[in-house]
Amino acid sequence: MSPAGTGARIALKNILFLTDFSEASQAALPFALAIGREFGATIHALHVLNPESYVYAAPEAAGVAVEAQEEIAEAEMQRVESQLVGMPHEVSVVRGIGIWPALEQAI
């Protein structure tokens, strides 16, 4: 019987960091970075906007709200990207396509 922890090492090439910019997401980023460094993996940071939450707003108000939501998300993603310096990475903010298509688009 061989001791635990011996054998072939796994290979990770891509790590998805899905964020809603919450404290919990921010707390997870150092772990994604550590794993990425350990394996030489690319970090894919992704935020999915949900403009459907404005479906019952007046069209003019919904448009302004969606634009504001996009601007905030882009600014937050720039903050995330600043923490990825020195790591292979891609950042994406996608809107209104659902989580699974967003994942396929990001990776």
Image (cartoon, grey):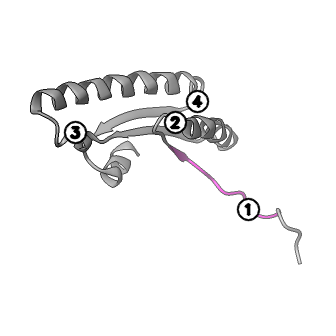
Say which residue label 1 marks: 8
Q: List x then y, in percent, for residue 9.
A: 72, 57
Magenta span covers which residues?
Answer: 6-17
Front-lying residue, 88 or 82: 82
Q: Is residue 85 magenta?
A: no
Q: Residues within 10 Å of mark 2 (few under 14, many from 20)?
A: few
Say which residue label 2 marks: 22
Q: Is residue 42 left or right of residue 31?
A: left
For the residues bearing labels 1 and 4, Cβ distance under 8 angstroms = no
Q: List x then y, in percent, for residue 104.
A: 35, 50
- State the SS at label 1: loop
Say which residue label 4 marks: 87
Q: Quadrant of residue 52?
A: top left
Q: Which numbered disc flags the more N-terminal residue, 2 or 3?
A: 2
- State the SS at label 4: loop
What's under tag 2, amino acid-wise? Ser
Q: CA separation, marks 3 and 4?
A: 36 Å
The residue most toward the bottom is 1
